[in-house]
Image (spheres, rainbow, N blue to C red):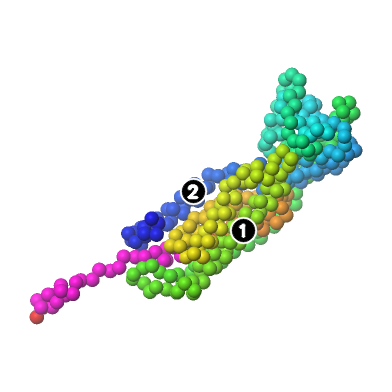
């Protein structure tokens, strides 16, 4: 249907339809918060760094992961290690048979989310309710004692075999911010350069009132858009998969982490699909490219723009390059695809008087 729709619309209606469609997509996606858009629990970047300075128990290693969003404890000892909660209650148990969580611990519910807060006045109701989380001896959890500013020292108590105390000690400090202005400027300038391709390259016209334009082999703009879509979509998909892989744990598989990032992942795949449509020269390729670019810019570019201003990354070290590529590529594809679709839209051919009517008029003049 889309390939025939422009034939029945005047130029002004085409302009309004294109603008309304793109603004509608941006407005709808604008309601998506960064956390919801990103899908994963940890934000793309934060302004603090969590460090683990010491662990008093031999055979137990602890580190901060996902930009300080969670702590990871790995046990190589045959002893049973219990992580104590905010009220000193048993919270997590790591032993030879794997990891179990105490669902009656007030700390348990808070540890399920990066924004969780436990009720420090509520005690544990009854005996611990241990439930198996994993058969391995590694566990990750959110701990409000070891995240967010202000800068401070923190500690998490441990218990060995129910008798011997232990402790994890660390610090939280402010992260050094990146060159925010340079990242934003570079991404926006790249978007302008991509959008200029649509103005610099001739577009094949489907209008009976215009020249047919360049042939299939000379439509450089189409191939340029396809290449840009492959780069932007491919980098986005690779970044999401790499971030999901870093967030996996024995209790959370790669598939679980990818499902949490489903929408931005589908957006990257959609941009790759737009590249295929450009290569195949489908009539809807340009408008699909514009819409896919808008989604990419919002769902990955603006949603994860915290990487430009915060110094601690939750994902791989090249996250800023990935988000900048998504933002520049998305905005550029939005502009270039929309302009190309508008310029190639057919217009109604001017009507001419029939030949017999012209002859009759000339006869009357004589």
**Residue name at image x 69 percent, y 32 percent:** 110
Q: Which residues are magenta?
A: 338-364
Q: Nearer the viewer, mark 2 or mark 1?
A: 1
Instruction: Pick out the residue farthest to the top.
Output: 126
User: Is residue 356 a member of the stretch shown in magenta?
Assistant: yes
Is 269 or 341 nearer to us in this picture? 269
Mark 1 Cα shell of 10 Å, populated few (<14), some (14-19), many (≥20): some
**Residue name at image x 39 percent, y 73 percent:** 212
User: Is residue 124 a member of the stretch shown in magenta?
Assistant: no
Q: Is residue 169 above or below residue 219?
A: above
Q: Is residue 81 above or below residue 52?
A: above
Residue 234 - label = 1
Q: Earlier in the sequence, mark 2 or mark 1?
A: 2
Please give left or right for residue 345 compared with residue 222 in the image: left
Is 149 or 325 nearer to us in this picture? 325
Label 2: which secondary element? helix
**Residue name at image x 90 percent, y 28 percent:** 164
Residue 34 - label = none
Label 1: which secondary element? helix
Q: Position of residue 22 (x, y in %)?
A: 46, 54
Mark 2 Cα shell of 10 Å, populated few (<14), some (14-19), many (≥20): few
For the question of whether residue 305 can be seen, the reply is yes
Question: Mark 2 = which residue?
Answer: 27
**Residue name at image x 42 percent, y 66 percent:** 343
């Amino acid at each position: 249907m889309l390939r025939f729709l422009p034939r029945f619309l005047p130029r002004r209606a085409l302009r309004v339809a294109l603008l309304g469609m793109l603004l509608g997509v941006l407005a709808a996606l604008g309601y998506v918060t960064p956390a919801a858009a990103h899908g994963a629990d940890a934000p793309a970047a934060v302004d603090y760094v969590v460090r683990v300075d010491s662990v008093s128990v031999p055979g137990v290693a602890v580190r901060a992961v996902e930009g300080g969003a969670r702590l990871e404890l790995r046990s190589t000892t045959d002893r049973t290690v219990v992580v104590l909660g905010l009220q000193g209650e048993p919270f997590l148990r790591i032993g030879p048979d794997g990891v179990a969580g105490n669902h009656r611990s007030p700390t348990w519910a808070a540890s399920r989310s990066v924004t969780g807060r436990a009720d420090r006045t509520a005690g544990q109701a009854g005996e611990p309710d241990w439930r198996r989380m994993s058969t391995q001896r590694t566990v990750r959890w959110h701990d409000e004692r070891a995240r967010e500013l202000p800068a401070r020292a923190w500690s998490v108590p441990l218990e060995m075999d129910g008798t011997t105390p232990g402790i994890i000690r660390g610090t939280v400090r402010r992260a050094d911010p990146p060159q925010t202005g340079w990242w934003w400027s570079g991404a926006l300038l790249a978007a302008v350069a991509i959008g200029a391709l649509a103005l610099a390259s001739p577009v094949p016209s489907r209008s009976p009132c215009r020249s047919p334009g360049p042939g299939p082999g000379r439509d450089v703009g189409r191939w340029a858009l396809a290449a840009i879509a492959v780069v932007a979509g491919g980098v986005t998909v690779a970044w999401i998969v790499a971030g999901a892989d870093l967030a996996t744990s024995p209790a959370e598989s790669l598939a679980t982490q990818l499902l949490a990032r489903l929408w931005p992942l589908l957006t990257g795949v959609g941009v790759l699909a737009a590249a295929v449509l450009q290569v195949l020269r489908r009539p809807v390729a340009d408008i699909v490219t514009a819409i896919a670019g808008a989604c990419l810019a919002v769902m990955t570019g603006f949603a994860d723009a915290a990487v430009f201003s915060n110094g601690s990354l939750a994902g791989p070290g090249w996250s800023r390059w990935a988000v900048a590529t998504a933002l520049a590529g998305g905005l550029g594809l939005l502009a270039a695809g929309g302009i190309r679709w508008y310029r190639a839209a057919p217009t109604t051919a001017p009507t001419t008087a029939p030949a017999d009517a012209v002859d009759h008029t000339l006869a009357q003049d004589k």
